[in-house]
Image: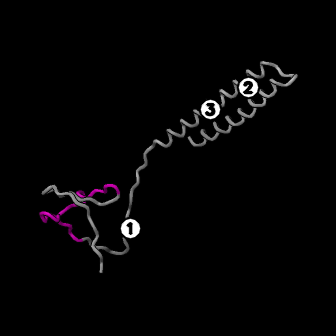
Amino acid sequence: MKAARTILYIVAGILIIFAFLFILGAFSPSGSTSWLLVGLGGLAVAFVFIIIGARLGAKAAGTTQNISVNVDLPGNMKMDAIKCQSCGAPLAADDIKMVQGAPVVTCHSCGTTYQLTEEPKW
């Protein structure tokens, strides 16, 4: 998509240059009115290419990206059991979800939802 858009812009630029030269040539003493029509037609085609290139860029920008984060911990790590702050029920890994970049847990027993925070290590 990006290559097609770039090629369309380059071709449109070349067409604009030649169309401008045809329009200037139409007003020279040896010029003809048909050169003016060719120049205006070339400008129209060039602007159509620019519009198509812009739409190709808009389609490419509308695609979604999935981002996954993997944490690689050094050595053997033990995980403490996480319990609900309200009812004390054990929480599973399925209860934790990332919402706007923050880990949020929903207790399956009492329905309480809160953000997980890391306690200082000292």
Magenta residues, as a range?
80-100
User: Badge 2: few (under 14), some or many (20 or more) residues near its Cα, within 10 Å?
Assistant: many
> Would you name the residue on which mark 3 appears?
49
Q: Which is in the foreground here, disc 2 or disc 3?
A: 2
> Would you name the residue on which mark 2 appears?
39
Q: Earlier in the sequence, mark 3 or mark 1?
A: 3
Q: Earlier in the sequence, mark 2 or mark 3?
A: 2
- In the rendered view, tell whether residue 82 sits above or below residue 96: below
| Kind of residue at disc 2 | Gly
* Quadrant into which the N terminus falls: top right
> Would you name the residue on which mark 1 appears?
72
| Kind of residue at disc 3 | Phe
Give the alpha-carbon distance from disc 2 to disc 1, as whole Å. 62 Å
Q: Which is in the foreground here, disc 3 or disc 1?
A: 3
Q: Secondary structure at mark 1?
A: loop
Q: Whole-percent x and y of residue 82?
A: 21, 67
User: Badge 1: few (under 14), some or many (20 or more) residues near its Cα, within 10 Å?
Assistant: few
Task: Pick whichever, 114 or 67, lies toward us.
Answer: 114
Give the alpha-carbon distance from disc 2 to disc 3, as whole Å. 15 Å
Query: Which residue does the image show at 29% across and 70% down from the upper left?
Result: 118
